[in-house]
Image (tube, grey):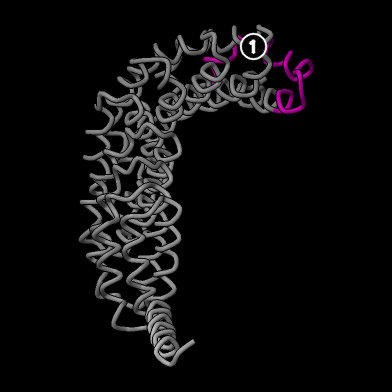
Amino acid sequence: MGLRDRLQNLKESVSQWTEDVSGNSPDRKIEKNLVEMESGSEIARTAAVKALVIQAPIDEKWLDPIINSFTRVLPKQPGTTQEAIIDGLMELRKHRPSKDKEIFDAMQQTFDSPSPNVRSKVVEIWTRFSLKSDAKKSDTIADLFEILSDEDKDVRYQTQESLMKILNTVPKAALPELKKALSDDDWRVVYHSIVILTDFAKKYPGPSASLAPEVIKAFNSGERLKERAADCIGILGLSNPDAMKPAVPGLIKGIESKSSELRKASSKAIGRIGSKNAMVVYHAVPRLAKALKNDDWYIHVEVVKALGYIASNKPALVKPHLEIIRNRTKTGADRNICQAAEWALKKAGG
């Protein structure tokens, strides 16, 4: 090999080495990952995002550009990559708290992500952020009520849990939003709103009773809502039994339903109302006593308790049925029924 050939080989080797060094530099790696995040396969994009989260804090000059890239591309990414970006943004905001608004605004755009996991994650993060910011709570509440109609059950339950947390911190905003949601055309929104109101009413019983008409309407509107609505009616009845009077005919029908769960829920609701004002539910007493004669042992504890609660308020209403209650103290299918019957018998003066 001549001198000229050796010089050419040396030149090519130096050129290749320079390219390799340049390609392996931190800047080149970050640039490559930024490109990969937008144009690679879903697996490659996700891997690039995770790499960028590690690389960003190492070189301060890249922190803002990477955060900006994440917020810009987040809404357009596939589900797995969106999750990785959201996790990354939550990590990088520790280094750039000044970017909080941009980060959370970008996350909010993924409320309609095709991935249920992403939607649930954003709901949970958005709730935590809103709980720390009074200014954000009202906007977040309205957004979350819309998400109660989500097709994915896990997303709806995450949203329900989040609304419970937020509404308990701003009770004045709760009732107007719940009133509107209880009249929604989507049964899923109504269902979760009933659950939220039931929880809310335990802490704020008086004001919650103002939504009795909406809950009673939901109870009478369809089978999907009856059990949850019956539970809510009972809780509201503890603070305002008179407001629950229009619900009693439906609850009596519930005692005779084919559904054991509905019979149980209806009996429990009647007992709660009757413990405060037995005359509101006096028509239900014979039906409760009749329910103790059937073979559905599953409901007997709640039925006997309901009779006991009514008797604690108005013993005379239950006295005609002392014999069937006394019978259950000895023949209940399990110890809980017998003990509940003994308690009810004492309340009724037996």
**Of the residues shown, which amino acid type is indicated by label 1?**
Leu
**Image quadrant where residue 71 sits:** bottom left
Looking at the image, which is closer to me, 62 or 345?
Answer: 62
Looking at the image, which is closer to me, 128 or 94?
Answer: 94
> How far across and how far down the image is residue 235, in percent?
43, 33
- For image coordinates 67% across by 27% down, the residue present is 340
Residue tagged 1: 292
> How far across and how far down the image is residue 52, in percent?
39, 70
> How far across and how far down the image is residue 237, in percent?
40, 30
**Image quadrant where residue 53 sits:** bottom left
Looking at the image, which is closer to me, 87 or 15?
Answer: 15
| Left or right for 335, reference 200 | right
Residue 57 visible at all:
no
Please provide the residue range marked out in magenta: 315-339
Q: Is residue 320 magenta?
A: yes
- For image coordinates 45% across by 9% down, the residue present is 253
- For image coordinates 42% across by 58% down, the residue present is 84
| Left or right for 256, reference 148 | right
Using a 10 Å C-alpha cutoff, classify the residue at mark 1 as few (fewer than 14 neighbours), some (14 to 19) or many (20 or more).
many
Magenta segment, principal secondary structure?
Answer: helix
Up-down relation of residue 191 to residue 8 (above or below): above
Residue 321 visible at all:
yes
Up-down relation of residue 22 to residue 217 (above or below): below
* Local secondary structure at mark 1: loop
> How far across and how far down the image is residue 226, in percent?
42, 20
